[in-house]
Amino acid sequence: MEIDKERPYWGHRIDVKASVWVSRPGRAIWASVCKVENAKLDRGFFDDPEEEPPRVSLTEALAEELGLTFDEADELVDAQVDELANDEGVVHGWLFDFSDLDLTARLRRKLERKHSDLRVTVAPYFFDRVHGRDSQPRRHYVHGDQHESEPAKYFCASCDLFVSADHFEAEHAGETEERFFASMRAWQRRPARSKINVRRPATASNLIVAAATAQRAAREATRSAFNRWLEQQLKRNDPVGDLARDVKGDRTFPIAEGSRGALEAYFERSGAVPEAIRAFREAWREFQAAAARQEAGSSVQIGQ
Ligand SMILES: [Zn+2]
Protein backbone atom coordinates (compact mmCIF):
# COMPACT_ATOMS: atom_id res chain seq x y z
CA MET A 1 0.00 0.00 0.00
CA GLU A 2 1.06 3.56 -0.69
CA ILE A 3 1.02 6.18 2.00
CA ASP A 4 -1.92 8.60 1.93
CA LYS A 5 -0.13 11.91 1.57
CA GLU A 6 -3.13 13.96 2.67
CA ARG A 7 -3.36 12.02 5.92
CA PRO A 8 0.11 10.66 6.47
CA TYR A 9 0.06 7.74 8.82
CA TRP A 10 2.80 5.40 9.82
CA GLY A 11 0.96 2.85 11.88
CA HIS A 12 1.13 2.65 15.61
CA ARG A 13 4.27 2.53 17.61
CA ILE A 14 3.92 0.56 20.77
CA ASP A 15 6.40 1.18 23.53
CA VAL A 16 7.02 -1.91 25.57
CA LYS A 17 8.91 -2.03 28.84
CA ALA A 18 9.80 -5.57 29.84
CA SER A 19 12.11 -7.40 32.22
CA VAL A 20 13.79 -10.70 31.46
CA TRP A 21 15.18 -13.03 34.12
CA VAL A 22 17.46 -15.80 33.07
CA SER A 23 18.46 -18.61 35.42
CA ARG A 24 20.51 -21.73 34.85
CA PRO A 25 19.20 -24.58 36.97
CA GLY A 26 21.29 -27.24 35.22
CA ARG A 27 24.36 -27.45 33.00
CA ALA A 28 22.43 -27.36 29.77
CA ILE A 29 19.13 -26.07 31.04
CA TRP A 30 18.23 -22.44 30.81
CA ALA A 31 15.08 -20.91 32.08
CA SER A 32 13.86 -17.47 31.42
CA VAL A 33 10.94 -15.41 32.53
CA CYS A 34 9.82 -12.39 30.62
CA LYS A 35 7.49 -9.97 32.30
CA VAL A 36 5.91 -7.10 30.41
CA GLU A 37 5.90 -4.17 32.81
CA ASN A 38 4.12 -1.76 30.59
CA ALA A 39 2.93 -1.55 27.00
CA LYS A 40 1.21 1.44 25.59
CA LEU A 41 0.35 3.00 22.31
CA ASP A 42 2.61 5.90 21.46
CA ARG A 43 0.19 8.33 19.86
CA GLY A 44 2.84 10.97 19.57
CA PHE A 45 0.60 13.49 21.34
CA PHE A 46 2.39 13.52 24.63
CA ASP A 47 5.75 15.07 25.05
CA ASP A 48 6.94 13.46 28.19
CA PRO A 49 10.67 14.21 28.28
CA GLU A 50 11.26 11.31 30.67
CA GLU A 51 9.96 8.84 28.16
CA GLU A 52 12.11 9.93 25.26
CA PRO A 53 13.64 6.96 23.48
CA PRO A 54 17.40 6.68 23.85
CA ARG A 55 19.39 8.58 21.23
CA VAL A 56 21.44 6.66 18.69
CA SER A 57 23.90 7.61 15.97
CA LEU A 58 22.72 7.94 12.38
CA THR A 59 24.59 4.73 11.57
CA GLU A 60 22.74 2.82 14.32
CA ALA A 61 19.39 4.27 13.28
CA LEU A 62 20.00 3.24 9.66
CA ALA A 63 21.18 -0.23 10.69
CA GLU A 64 18.01 -0.83 12.70
CA GLU A 65 15.66 0.69 10.18
CA LEU A 66 17.09 -1.17 7.19
CA GLY A 67 18.04 -4.43 8.89
CA LEU A 68 21.76 -4.05 8.23
CA THR A 69 24.92 -4.53 10.25
CA PHE A 70 26.62 -1.50 11.76
CA ASP A 71 29.45 -1.65 9.20
CA GLU A 72 27.02 -1.85 6.33
CA ALA A 73 24.96 1.07 7.60
CA ASP A 74 28.16 3.06 7.99
CA GLU A 75 28.54 2.97 4.20
CA LEU A 76 25.21 4.79 3.88
CA VAL A 77 25.57 7.92 6.00
CA ASP A 78 26.75 9.99 3.01
CA ALA A 79 23.56 9.26 1.09
CA GLN A 80 21.29 11.93 -0.28
CA VAL A 81 18.14 12.38 1.81
CA ASP A 82 15.01 14.41 1.05
CA GLU A 83 12.09 15.34 3.22
CA LEU A 84 8.76 14.15 1.82
CA ALA A 85 5.81 16.43 2.54
CA ASN A 86 2.34 17.01 1.18
CA ASP A 87 1.11 20.37 -0.16
CA GLU A 88 0.27 21.55 3.34
CA GLY A 89 3.80 20.87 4.45
CA VAL A 90 3.00 17.83 6.58
CA VAL A 91 6.06 15.61 6.56
CA HIS A 92 5.18 12.00 5.78
CA GLY A 93 8.63 10.51 5.45
CA TRP A 94 12.25 10.78 4.39
CA LEU A 95 13.57 9.43 1.15
CA PHE A 96 17.11 8.06 1.26
CA ASP A 97 18.73 7.66 -2.13
CA PHE A 98 21.66 5.22 -2.03
CA SER A 99 22.01 4.89 -5.79
CA ASP A 100 24.82 7.45 -6.12
CA LEU A 101 26.97 5.93 -3.39
CA ASP A 102 29.96 3.77 -4.14
CA LEU A 103 28.56 0.71 -2.36
CA THR A 104 30.10 -2.74 -2.19
CA ALA A 105 28.33 -5.16 -4.52
CA ARG A 106 27.24 -7.22 -1.53
CA LEU A 107 25.52 -4.35 0.23
CA ARG A 108 23.93 -3.20 -3.01
CA ARG A 109 22.42 -6.66 -3.52
CA LYS A 110 21.28 -6.84 0.10
CA LEU A 111 19.50 -3.49 -0.11
CA GLU A 112 17.86 -4.42 -3.39
CA ARG A 113 16.73 -7.73 -1.96
CA LYS A 114 15.32 -6.26 1.25
CA HIS A 115 13.86 -3.04 -0.12
CA SER A 116 13.62 -3.86 -3.84
CA ASP A 117 15.20 -0.48 -4.60
CA LEU A 118 18.16 1.72 -3.72
CA ARG A 119 15.73 4.50 -2.84
CA VAL A 120 14.18 3.78 0.53
CA THR A 121 11.49 5.71 2.39
CA VAL A 122 11.60 5.80 6.18
CA ALA A 123 9.15 7.10 8.77
CA PRO A 124 8.74 10.85 9.41
CA TYR A 125 10.11 10.48 12.96
CA PHE A 126 13.26 8.68 11.75
CA PHE A 127 15.61 11.53 12.66
CA ASP A 128 13.95 12.31 16.01
CA ARG A 129 16.05 9.80 17.90
CA VAL A 130 19.31 10.51 16.10
CA HIS A 131 22.04 12.19 18.16
CA GLY A 132 22.35 15.87 17.43
CA ARG A 133 18.76 16.38 16.29
CA ASP A 134 16.93 19.16 18.12
CA SER A 135 13.16 19.41 18.32
CA GLN A 136 13.52 22.56 16.19
CA PRO A 137 16.19 21.81 13.60
CA ARG A 138 17.98 24.80 12.13
CA ARG A 139 16.35 26.11 8.96
CA HIS A 140 18.47 25.93 5.80
CA TYR A 141 17.93 28.57 3.12
CA VAL A 142 18.74 28.23 -0.56
CA HIS A 143 19.17 31.16 -2.95
CA GLY A 144 15.89 33.11 -3.08
CA ASP A 145 14.19 31.40 -0.11
CA GLN A 146 11.82 33.60 1.85
CA HIS A 147 12.71 34.21 5.50
CA GLU A 148 10.44 32.19 7.79
CA SER A 149 9.52 34.99 10.17
CA GLU A 150 10.31 38.09 8.07
CA PRO A 151 8.37 37.63 4.82
CA ALA A 152 9.89 40.72 3.16
CA LYS A 153 13.37 39.20 3.30
CA TYR A 154 14.94 36.63 1.04
CA PHE A 155 18.21 34.76 1.20
CA CYS A 156 20.92 35.66 -1.30
CA ALA A 157 23.45 32.81 -1.52
CA SER A 158 25.88 34.96 -3.54
CA CYS A 159 26.10 37.51 -0.71
CA ASP A 160 25.24 35.09 2.14
CA LEU A 161 22.73 37.66 3.43
CA PHE A 162 19.02 38.25 3.77
CA VAL A 163 17.99 40.94 1.32
CA SER A 164 14.89 42.58 -0.13
CA ALA A 165 13.15 41.18 -3.20
CA ASP A 166 14.61 43.72 -5.65
CA HIS A 167 18.20 42.88 -4.66
CA PHE A 168 18.46 39.88 -7.02
CA GLU A 169 17.68 41.79 -10.19
CA ALA A 170 19.66 44.85 -9.09
CA GLU A 171 22.83 43.04 -8.01
CA HIS A 172 22.92 39.74 -9.85
CA ALA A 173 20.97 40.25 -13.08
CA GLY A 174 21.37 37.33 -15.46
CA GLU A 175 23.07 35.00 -13.01
CA THR A 176 20.55 34.58 -10.24
CA GLU A 177 18.63 31.69 -11.88
CA GLU A 178 21.81 29.68 -12.39
CA ARG A 179 22.73 30.46 -8.77
CA PHE A 180 19.36 29.14 -7.60
CA PHE A 181 19.90 25.75 -9.23
CA ALA A 182 23.46 25.52 -7.91
CA SER A 183 22.26 26.38 -4.40
CA MET A 184 19.43 23.85 -4.62
CA ARG A 185 21.75 21.12 -5.95
CA ALA A 186 24.23 21.73 -3.15
CA TRP A 187 21.44 21.32 -0.59
CA GLN A 188 20.04 18.18 -2.19
CA ARG A 189 23.44 16.54 -2.49
CA ARG A 190 24.39 17.32 1.05
CA PRO A 191 25.00 13.98 2.78
CA ALA A 192 22.49 12.68 5.33
CA ARG A 193 25.01 12.85 8.19
CA SER A 194 25.28 16.63 7.78
CA LYS A 195 21.50 17.08 7.53
CA ILE A 196 20.69 15.70 10.98
CA ASN A 197 19.91 19.06 12.51
CA VAL A 198 19.07 21.21 9.50
CA ARG A 199 15.96 21.23 7.47
CA ARG A 200 14.48 22.97 4.49
CA PRO A 201 10.75 22.28 4.17
CA ALA A 202 9.81 20.75 0.85
CA THR A 203 7.20 23.52 0.59
CA ALA A 204 9.61 26.41 1.33
CA SER A 205 8.57 29.50 -0.56
CA ASN A 206 11.14 30.86 -2.95
CA LEU A 207 11.26 34.08 -4.96
CA ILE A 208 13.28 32.72 -7.88
CA VAL A 209 12.12 29.15 -8.47
CA ALA A 210 9.34 30.01 -10.95
CA ALA A 211 11.46 32.31 -13.13
CA ALA A 212 14.44 29.95 -12.93
CA THR A 213 12.35 26.97 -13.99
CA ALA A 214 10.81 28.90 -16.87
CA GLN A 215 14.22 30.13 -17.99
CA ARG A 216 15.64 26.63 -17.89
CA ALA A 217 12.69 25.29 -19.92
CA ALA A 218 13.22 28.04 -22.53
CA ARG A 219 16.92 27.23 -22.72
CA GLU A 220 16.16 23.51 -23.06
CA ALA A 221 13.83 24.26 -25.96
CA THR A 222 16.60 25.98 -27.94
CA ARG A 223 19.07 23.09 -27.65
CA SER A 224 20.15 21.45 -30.90
CA ALA A 225 19.56 17.76 -31.56
CA PHE A 226 23.34 17.23 -31.35
CA ASN A 227 23.49 18.86 -27.94
CA ARG A 228 20.72 16.60 -26.65
CA TRP A 229 22.40 13.52 -28.08
CA LEU A 230 25.73 14.50 -26.55
CA GLU A 231 24.17 14.81 -23.11
CA GLN A 232 23.10 11.19 -23.28
CA GLN A 233 26.79 10.21 -23.63
CA LEU A 234 27.84 11.74 -20.29
CA LYS A 235 28.51 8.42 -18.58
CA ARG A 236 30.69 6.95 -21.32
CA ASN A 237 34.21 6.07 -20.42
CA ASP A 238 35.88 7.16 -23.67
CA PRO A 239 36.85 10.37 -25.53
CA VAL A 240 33.21 11.04 -26.51
CA GLY A 241 32.24 10.80 -22.81
CA ASP A 242 35.06 13.24 -21.96
CA LEU A 243 33.79 15.62 -24.63
CA ALA A 244 30.22 15.39 -23.32
CA ARG A 245 31.40 16.26 -19.80
CA ASP A 246 33.54 19.17 -21.08
CA VAL A 247 30.62 20.57 -23.05
CA LYS A 248 28.28 20.24 -20.07
CA GLY A 249 30.70 22.18 -17.89
CA ASP A 250 31.23 24.91 -20.51
CA ARG A 251 28.75 27.67 -19.79
CA THR A 252 29.53 29.53 -23.02
CA PHE A 253 28.99 26.50 -25.26
CA PRO A 254 26.59 27.32 -28.16
CA ILE A 255 23.90 24.80 -27.20
CA ALA A 256 21.55 25.89 -30.01
CA GLU A 257 24.20 25.46 -32.73
CA GLY A 258 23.37 22.53 -35.01
CA SER A 259 25.98 22.80 -37.76
CA ARG A 260 29.11 20.70 -37.68
CA GLY A 261 31.32 23.42 -39.17
CA ALA A 262 30.20 26.06 -36.67
CA LEU A 263 30.74 23.70 -33.74
CA GLU A 264 34.21 22.70 -34.91
CA ALA A 265 35.06 26.38 -35.34
CA TYR A 266 33.90 26.98 -31.75
CA PHE A 267 36.17 24.20 -30.43
CA GLU A 268 39.13 25.60 -32.36
CA ARG A 269 38.44 29.15 -31.19
CA SER A 270 38.31 28.04 -27.58
CA GLY A 271 41.69 26.33 -27.87
CA ALA A 272 40.57 22.68 -27.80
CA VAL A 273 43.40 20.11 -27.98
CA PRO A 274 43.59 17.88 -31.12
CA GLU A 275 42.20 14.92 -29.11
CA ALA A 276 39.10 16.94 -28.30
CA ILE A 277 38.60 17.85 -31.98
CA ARG A 278 38.97 14.17 -32.90
CA ALA A 279 36.47 13.24 -30.20
CA PHE A 280 34.06 15.83 -31.60
CA ARG A 281 34.35 14.37 -35.12
CA GLU A 282 33.75 10.88 -33.77
CA ALA A 283 30.77 12.15 -31.74
CA TRP A 284 29.34 13.85 -34.81
CA ARG A 285 29.64 10.62 -36.86
CA GLU A 286 27.85 8.64 -34.17
CA PHE A 287 25.18 11.31 -33.77
CA GLN A 288 24.50 11.30 -37.52
CA ALA A 289 24.29 7.51 -37.58
CA ALA A 290 21.87 7.55 -34.63
CA ALA A 291 19.76 10.26 -36.30
CA ALA A 292 19.68 8.27 -39.57
CA ARG A 293 18.60 5.13 -37.72
CA GLN A 294 15.86 7.05 -35.98
CA GLU A 295 14.65 8.52 -39.27
CA ALA A 296 14.60 5.07 -40.89
CA GLY A 297 12.65 3.80 -37.87
CA SER A 298 10.04 6.54 -38.07
CA SER A 299 9.56 6.21 -41.86
CA VAL A 300 8.95 2.49 -41.42
CA GLN A 301 6.29 3.38 -38.90
CA ILE A 302 4.70 5.85 -41.29
CA GLY A 303 4.77 3.22 -44.06
CA GLN A 304 2.89 0.68 -41.98
ZN1 LIG B 1 23.39 39.17 -3.36
Image (cartoon, grey):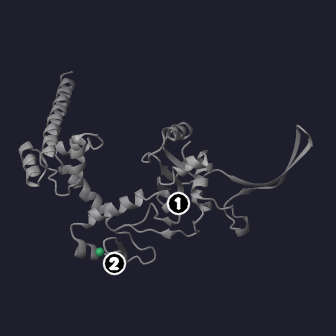
On the image, the x and y values in percent for residue 142 come to 38, 67
Left or right? Give the position of 284 relative to 180. Answer: left
Residue 18 visible, this angle: yes
Quarter in which the N terminus is drawn: top right
Q: Is residue 59 above or below residue 111?
A: below
Mark 1 element type: loop
Q: Nearer the viewer, residue 238 or 265?
A: 238
The amino acid sitting under disc 2 is: Val
Specify the quadrant of the image occupied by residue 163. Answer: bottom left
Q: Residues within 10 Å of mark 1 (few under 14, many from 20)?
A: some
For disc 2, the marked residue is 163
Q: How many marks?
A: 2
Q: Dot 2 surroundings within 10 Å: few (below 14), some, or many (20 or more)?
A: some
Dot placed on the residue nearer the N-terminal end, 2 or 1? 1
Label 2 close to label 1 by CB (< 8 Å): no
Rendered image quadrant of residue 229: top left
Considering the image in quadrants, where does the C terminus appear?
A: top left
Q: Nearer the viewer, residue 247 or 298?
A: 247
Cα–Cα span, label 2 and label 1: 28 Å
Quickly name the residue at label 1: 90
